[in-house]
Amino acid sequence: MNNDSFSDMQIRFGQLVKEKRIKLGLSQARLAEIIFSNKRSILDIELGRGNPTLETVYKLITFLKINSHSIFYPEPVPPSEEVADFMHMLEGRSEKELHMLKHICHLVLDFADDVTHTSAV
């Protein structure tokens, strides 16, 4: 497991803790009392910082009824309809065609950036 995925997991866990805590109408201090922790630990967890003990993680998951699968195995975000349509257009193209299309996309995007910056001035 690389550091990025661990950091993502910490952030995901913190977001879930905060979401569930708020849904229950609990303050950070009250949640800390319930699980025998402290407010600062709850704040750090919600911000995706720190390194809570397995005991603390277990207490939070159990009390807040967080599905641990959603922390360790999150659902991939499906692409937007526009992205899916674009990807569909690229299916079945040769490597040569894909290389050429990539180059064209870069040119078009660079041109669009130039136009945007020029019109903003």
Image: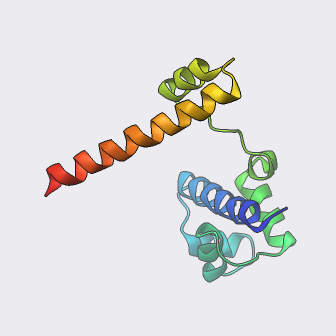
Q: What residue sits 41% from the left and 41% below the top?
A: 107
Residues 52 and 100: in front is 100
In the shown orientation, is residue 90 left or right of residue 67?
left
Height in image: 48 above or below 41? above
Q: What residue sits 66% from the left and 71% below the top?
A: 45
Of the 4 image quadrants, the one containing the C terminus is bottom left
In the shown orientation, is residue 26 left or right of residue 62?
left
Height in image: 72 above or below 35? above
Q: Give the quarter of the image for residue 35.
A: bottom right
In the shown orientation, is residue 63 left or right of residue 22?
right
Residues 53 and 121: in front is 121
Q: What residue sits 74% from the left and 46% below the top?
A: 70
Expressed as whole percent of the image width and height from the top left, the position of residue 91 reads 66, 20
Q: Give the quarter of the image for residue 15.
A: bottom right
Of the 4 image quadrants, the one containing the N terminus is bottom right
Height in image: 117 above or below 46? above
In the shown orientation, is residue 8 left or right of residue 23?
right
Expressed as whole percent of the image width and height from the top left, the position of residue 16 reads 64, 55
The colour scheme is rainbow
Number of on-image labels: 0
Height in image: 44 above or below 115? below
Expressed as whole percent of the image width and height from the top left, the position of residue 12 reads 66, 57
Expressed as whole percent of the image width and height from the top left, the position of residue 8 reads 68, 60
